[in-house]
Image (cartoon, rainbow, N blue to C red):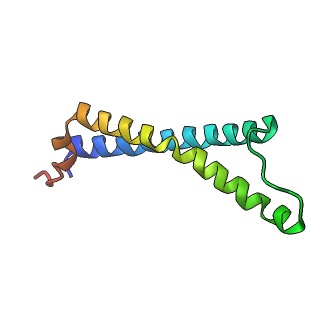
Amino acid sequence: MNQAALLAWTSLYIAVGSMALICAVLAIMVTFYELKAGVWRPALSTKFQIALAVPKIWLRWQKNYLFGAPVIVAISIAYAHHVGFATFWNIEPIG
């Protein structure tokens, strides 16, 4: 793999990982805000509903996290366009 392609792929992976981490933290903050403000609250009237509270909170976090996925994809595509799509596919070995 040539140096430009390696640098482009590495920087893309680091950027997407960083954006996913930021998105996960923001999803946690939104989920806790929704619980605290009463915007969303799982039912807790029976023992069965109490047992399902953690999975329901997890699914709510997943929903909030997935709202950030289009932004991550758009930023990644914009970066790849800026660098040049041909740079990513030029993986022929040098020498």
Q: Position of residue 14 (x, y in %)?
A: 43, 42
- Where in the figure is residue 34, as x and y percent of width and height? 73, 39
Give the quadrant of residue 27.
top right
Give the camera-side residue of 61 and 92. 61
Task: Judge left or right: residue 71 versus residue 42.
Answer: left
Residue at point 50%, 40% (across, down) = 68
Looking at this view, is 47 or 14 the one in front? 47
Q: Is residue 32 above or below residue 61?
A: above
Q: How many marks?
A: 0
| Residue lying at the far top of the rendered structure | 82
Which residue is the extreme one toward the left?
Answer: 95
- In-image side of 26 versus 50 (left or right): left
Residue 87 position within the rendered picture, expressed as x and y whole percent measured from the top left:
19, 42
Please give left or right for residue 28 compared with residue 3 in the image. Answer: right
**Nearest the camera: 19 or 42?**
42
Q: Residue at x 59, y 49 (%)?
A: 63
Query: Which residue lies at the image location 18% right of the left edge and 49% below the top edge?
Result: 89
For the point 74% across and 36% down, the residue is: 33
When asked about the image quadrant of residue 64, the answer is top right
Front one among 68 and 56 = 56
Q: Is 8 on the left or on the right of 65, as rendered? A: left
User: Compared with residue 84, is residue 59 higher up or lower down, i.e. above or below?
Assistant: below
